[in-house]
Amino acid sequence: MARSKTVIDAYIAAAPAEAQRPLRHIRDMVRRVAPEAEEIMSYRMPAFRQGRILINFAAFKAHIGVFPPVRGDAKLERALTPWMGPKGNLKLLLGEPLPLDLLERVVKLRLAAAATPKRKTVKR
């Protein structure tokens, strides 16, 4: 984990200046909400894993992308509509306030899903 933390520090430091602060805010929020989650790099993006990937986030030219798509809470999905892309990933425009309260709800939703054991498929 120490290596991933260092790699994530380097990723944030190499991001465009206007993206660094939002990336740090997202990272700090996830650390607070999911203190047991492991920081990793996944698909060349910073990510947090606890049983499964909770969240990936990445800097792009004009926005921060948040992955995977949000599913499983219709009320939260409606609240995230202004930031939701066509596949359900979030696109947070640089220079605009981060919806950290909603991102926190996303992480909590993903934590709950990670804690739920997967059902085994029964062949008939």
Image (tube, rainbow, N blue to C red):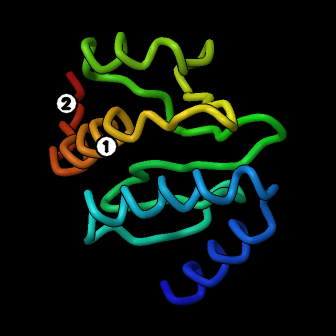
Which amino acid does the dot numbered 1 rest on?
A: Glu
109 w.r.t. 27: above or below: above
Which amino acid does the dot numbered 2 rest on?
A: Val
3D distance between C-alphas at marks 2 and 1: 35 Å
89 w.r.t. 101: above or below: above
The spot of residue 81 in percent (x, y) is: 46, 12
Residue at point 78%, 60% (across, down): 15
Residue 122 — which label? 2
Q: Nearer the viewer, mark 2 or mark 1?
A: 1
The spot of residue 68 in percent (x, y) is: 51, 37
Task: Tell which circle, 2 or 1, labels the residue nearer the N-terminal end.
Answer: 1
The spot of residue 28 in percent (x, y) is: 41, 63
* Front in this rendered view, residue 115 or 102: 102
25 w.r.t. 121: above or below: below
Residue at point 37%, 54% (across, down): 52
- The residue at which mark 1 appears reads as 104
10 w.r.t. 52: above or below: below
Residue 55 — which label? none
Q: How many marks?
A: 2
SS at mark 1 in the image: helix
The spot of residue 64 in percent (x, y) is: 65, 41
Quarter of the image containing the C terminus? Answer: top left
SS at mark 2 in the image: loop
Residue at point 48%, 53% (across, down): 26
* Front in this rendered view, residue 78 or 16: 16
